[in-house]
Image (tube, grey):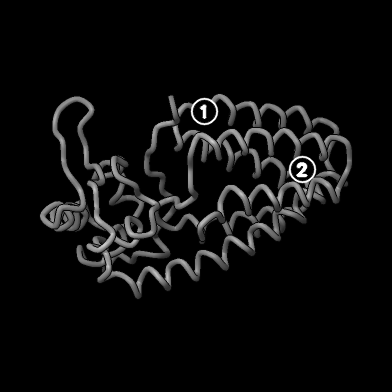
Amino acid sequence: MGLQADASFADLSDVVSAASTPGQIADHIMASIAAGALPEGTRLPAERDLADALAVSRSSVRAALSTLERAGFVVRRRGRGGGTFISRVEAGRVDVYADRLTEFRRARRDLLDARAIIQNRVAAAAADRRPDDSVAQLRSRALDYEHATTAAEARTADARLHHAIALAAGNPHLVEIAQELDRKINAGFRHDPFSDSLFARACADHTAIVDAIAAGRAEDAGQLCEAHFRSTTMSGS
């Protein structure tokens, strides 16, 4: 059985201001649907959680979701296992968002490219500078990823592993740069593509990266890490 899809959120307060209208929220969600970040069946967070992430009122979120529901882009289910889910959306129905989507993809592609380059150097620095006790933690983080049972758990475990790699580099500014890029990329719904094949690829990548760091092979670690980010997050970008 494949990992279950779910929507993950980062801090959106820099993206959607307190003055955001329900229409702006609906547009933001619609752009994510059009980009493929929210495939059919994805469960959105509860209204309260989404409102907190967007730094807006629950009434604004409720109005935005109602707009999307009336348009047929989401469906609400009550009872156990209920919530708000992304509906099946035909490609032609999102043509009106073409300009917004083109801008969204261009900015995202540039950010992903920057992150891949930075993570190359972060992993290389970790291989050169890592504390003796860091390898055990890195292996533990990689194992946490392998044990993930949902897409959301896998993305969280992946972020924790790469954060641990950044910490092992021994430079707080590198950690800050990596975190800032992640905040910009994930300022909204997490858009990384996900599938069983990508999950398997990431498991193998993580093992190779950690092995290279443990062995002090800086250039190998850097190149493996950059290739990992490009192959698992930039396909189709």
Residue 217 in view here: yes
Residue linked to disc 1: 148
Instruction: Mark 2: give few (<14), some (14-19) or many (20+) Cα within 10 Å.
Output: many
**Placement of the N terminus among the 4 image quadrants:** top left
Q: Position of residue 29 (x, y in %)?
A: 30, 57
What's the residue at 52%, 39% (across, down)? Answer: 156
Corner quadrant of residue 137: top right
The answer to whether residue 114 is left or right of residue 222 is left
Secondary element at tag 2: helix
Residue 170 in view here: no
Whether residue 172 is situated above or below residue 131 in the rendered picture = below
Q: Which kind of residue does numbered mark 1 sit on?
A: Ala
The answer to whether residue 160 is left or right of residue 207 is left
Q: Position of residue 190 (x, y in %)?
A: 44, 50
Front residue (pair 217, 126): 217
What's the residue at 25%, 63% (across, down)? Answer: 92
The answer to whether residue 197 is left or right of residue 39 is right
The answer to whether residue 15 is left or right of residue 27 is right
> Which is in the foreground here, disc 2 or disc 1?
1
N-term-proximal mark, 2 vs 1: 1
Q: Position of residue 202 (x, y in %)?
A: 62, 38
Front residue (pair 2, 70): 2
Whether residue 34 is situated above or below residue 215 in the rendered picture = below
Secondary element at tag 1: loop
Q: Which kind of residue does numbered mark 2 sit on?
A: Ala
Corner quadrant of residue 145: top right
Residue linked to disc 2: 168
Q: Evaluate if marks 2 and 1 touch, with contact meaning CB atoms under 8 Å apart.
A: no
Corner quadrant of residue 216: top right
